[in-house]
Image (cartoon, rainbow, N blue to C red):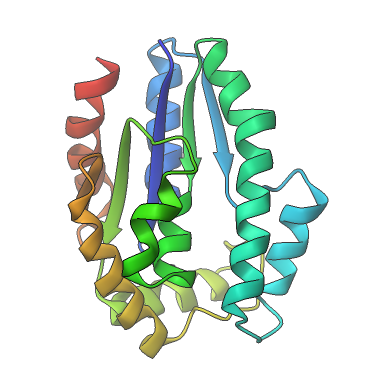
Amino acid sequence: MNKFIVFDGIDGSGKTSQAKMLAKWLRKKGKNVLFTHEPTRTTKLGRYIEKRIRRGVDNKAELLDLYTRDREAHLKNEIIPAMKKGRIVVCDRYYYSTLAYQLPEKKWKSYVLGFLKPDIAFIYDVPAETAIKRIEKSIKKDERRFKKKAIFEKLNVLKKLRKKYLAMKRFKEVRIIDSKPLPDKIFEKTLKEARKIVG
């Protein structure tokens, strides 16, 4: 049973924790799962993007091109091959991030047509103030891969991004999840929706 499940939201929304929790739950159920990320972590391009977004310059056109090329390769080399083998793909970030971070709403519809649509996409919603507190806490506790904040991890930026993410409820596959509660409570809501497509 191949399914494509995406987790997205502003930085500090808790999406990565929820994605890992679902992947773990699926594996316990005996499912063959590929847990993956965007930008990719196994390619030169993906690693370059990670460094790029921590250099302090937000060039939307450049980042749009980089993320798009990385996504095309990700689909071709990892996601689609895994699905052809009947695996469930759990992806931490996908084109919803590009829609929020690099594109105006009027370009959303045409952009997504060029990519595989997920079976379900969870978007985790949290106030920007809460997200910033979570980001700073995780940096202090050394829980992140990068100690330096990305260029988007600023209060005014996250407020704008949150509004764009909430506007994505127009997509039928999107489920907006309130991520203010504790992780286990959030996961109850995630699992309720996920079970509708994975059984």
Against 162, is 25 above or below? above
Q: Residue at x 51, y 16 (%)?
A: 87
Q: Nearer the viewer, residue 25 or 122?
A: 122
Q: Given the current orientation, which residue lies at the most extreme right position?
A: 44
Q: Residue at x 41, y 84 (%)?
A: 157
Q: Nearer the viewer, residue 48 or 178?
A: 48
Q: Residue at x 20, y 58 (%)?
A: 181
For the C terminus, the quadrant is: top left
Task: Please provide percent x and percent y for residue 38.
Answer: 58, 50
Q: Nearer the viewer, residue 18 or 158?
A: 158
User: Can I make out residue 106 in this image?
Assistant: yes
Q: Quadrant of residue 148?
A: bottom right
* 35 relative to 186 in the view: left or right: right
Task: Please provide percent x and percent y for residue 107.
Answer: 38, 64
Task: Please provide percent x and percent y for residue 131.
Answer: 36, 73
Task: Please provide percent x and percent y for residue 48.
Answer: 77, 63
* 178 relative to 26 in the view: left or right: left
Q: Residue at x 37, y 45 (%)?
A: 18
